[in-house]
Amino acid sequence: MPQPDIIVTAPLPPFLYDPLKADYRCHDYYAAPDKDHLLATGGRQVRGLVQGGGTVTEPTLLDQLPQLEIISVFGVGYDGVPVDYCKKRGVKVTNTPDVLTDDVADVAVALIMMTGRGFARLERFARAGDWEKRSVELTTKLGGKRVGILGLGRIGKAIASRVSALGMEVAYTGRKPQDVSYRFLPDLKSLASDVDFLVVACPGGPATRNLVNAEVLAALGKKGILINIARGSIVDEPALVNALQNGTIKGAGLDVFANEPHIPAPLLTMDHVVLLPHVGSATHETRKAMGDLCKANLDSWFAGKGVLTLIPELA
Ligand code: 8YV
């Protein structure tokens, strides 16, 4: 049987790309110097597409892949995939849920600790030799503080159980209340005004764009810290910069940004902000598991056995 043609639209790690190259005819759209030429010469044969969680795939690109059957996302988020378009065309979309849940939840807890307990700032303090010059600032006890989770999905629930173990209280908002022991608040503004840490853990995409806006940040207030491990698009970034500059909120811990890898310049110099370069799933173990699942979805599809992790909108 001839190897199916697939197009690759994001940089992939060797532990995913090498096995893909062994089993598929890969067209490296991401690295191609002349993308139009690649599409003109190979586009018609392409049956599969592999992209990253943050990759934006334009329908105009998919229009040039008339035989496309499946998009396999190397990531849990598929906000860059035009889902309605794929639905209409009958293109399957798969992602890599579950295998990264624990790692992403760990990063949320790390950001809560780094901001709340001031660990990032204190580490800079120790490293700068400031301990020899003055006493250490006191920070905030985490036990008993309230954590509000926007989006109690798999990752949101893993964050909830971790912060519960720290003695923190959990509340959440989302589309509907769930059968869980945590308190449900029907809207984001009420949740923000009720908590010490507001953790963004919902999917990105048009439905959640700029959901955390100036009003929500004002509700979070002077004692509130914003944590985002989901997508930069969910937070109105200029409004967040303003809120941090004006002391509207106490601080922020951010793993994701609206226009990655760009981080807005004012954030870089703020002492009450902790910045990470989108490392939610960035461990050897988890990225390997994501890569295996990303390829397994293609393998299963092209073996005529369906896909393993179809996104809910297409199920
Ligand atoms: C990865 C992610 O950075 O899973 C996601 O949606 O954002 C991250 O785990 C990304 O998918 C790697 O391509």
Image: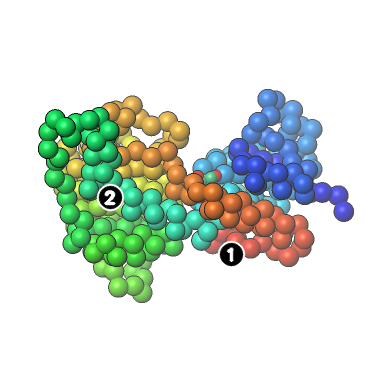
Q: Residues within 10 Å of mark 2 (few under 14, many from 20)?
A: some
* First in residue order: circle 1 vs circle 2: 2
Residue lying furthest front in this view? 132
Query: For the residue labelled by badge 1, is the local secondary structure a helix, a strand or a loop?
Result: loop
Q: Residues within 10 Å of mark 1 (few under 14, many from 20)?
A: few
Quadrant for the C terminus, please.
Answer: bottom right
Name the residue: 23% across, 48% down.
Answer: 116
Q: CA distance from mark 1 to mark 2?
A: 38 Å
Q: Secondary structure at mark 2?
A: helix
Looking at this view, is 181 or 111 the one in front?
111
Q: Residue furthest right?
A: 1
Residue at numbered disc 1: 315
Q: Relative to residue 142, is residue 313 drawn left or right?
A: right
As drawn, is 58 to the left or to the right of 90? left
Snapshot colouring? rainbow
Residue closest to the eye, 94 or 134: 134
Type of the residue with mark 2: Met
Q: Any mark on residue 231, and which?
A: none
Read off the residue under disc 2.
Answer: 113
Image coordinates of residue 178 in percent, x first then y, are 36, 71
| Residue 119 x, y percent position in the rendering | 26, 44
Residue occupying image coordinates x 39% and y 54%: 106
Please state which amino acid type lies under the numbered disc 1.
Ala
From this viewpoint, is residue 284 visible?
Answer: yes
Q: Is residue 70 left or right of residue 121?
A: right
**Front in this rendered view, residue 259 or 85:** 259
Image point 23% across, 34% down: which residue? 125
